[in-house]
Image: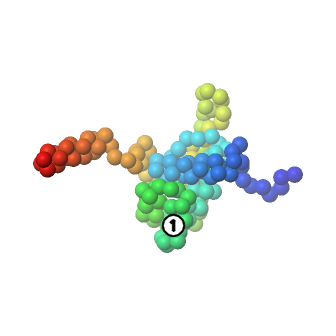
Amino acid sequence: MRHKIGKAKLGRTTSHRRALLSNLSVALFKHEQIRTTISKAKALRPVAEKLITLGKSQKLHARRNAQGFLQDEKITKKLFDTIGKRFATRAGGYTRIVRSNPRRGDAVDMAIIELLDRDVKAKGTDAGPTKEAAEKRRKEEASKEQQGE
């Protein structure tokens, strides 16, 4: 019997499951709302809540632990600077799982996991530079090359 075994294996090896949860956490903190399967959302919830608790502490050791799991400096900075401060007075329960329509291809049950008190503008944004910013940087570099010649 599998008494008191609380971790969903998700049909993956340990390293694959850890990478999956890390990537889902990064996506959740970047967009503050993601759509995934119910089982993945339920597995992600305790991981995300522990990371937010780390973000609330504002200590170097906590930041390094979070960085080691997330592997993304921009998202770690967002976790500690904005998300951690947003939930500073809340004692727990930082995420919400809402069931959604089944996926069209294979009819698996889907869910939306989101941060409470989320920033609606964060959804759909990317941490990387926009096309306009990249084009502007490319033009500046070209003008510097021409001046240097």
Farthest top residue in view: 105
Instruction: Give the amino acid type for the residue marked by disc 1 in the picture.
Output: Arg
Q: Quadrant of residue 107?
A: top right
Where residue 126 appears, as percent x and y from the top left, is 40, 45
Left/right of residue 39 with respect to residue 140 in the rendered view: right
- For disc 1, the marked residue is 64
| Number of numbered markers | 1
Q: Residue at x 69, y 45 (%)?
A: 12
Q: Quadrant of residue 49?
A: bottom right
Judge by depth and name the residue closer to the eye, 128 or 106: 128
Judge by depth and name the residue closer to the eye, 120 or 143: 143
The answer to whether one can see residue 138 in this image is yes
Judge by depth and name the residue closer to the eye, 52 or 65: 65
The answer to whether one can see residue 90 in this image is no
Where residue 21 appears, as percent x and y from the top left, is 60, 50
Where residue 70 appears, as percent x and y from the top left, is 52, 56
Left/right of residue 21 with respect to residue 137 in the rendered view: right
Q: Residue at x 83, y 52 (%)?
A: 2
Q: Residue at x 72, y 53 (%)?
A: 7
Farthest front residue in view: 149
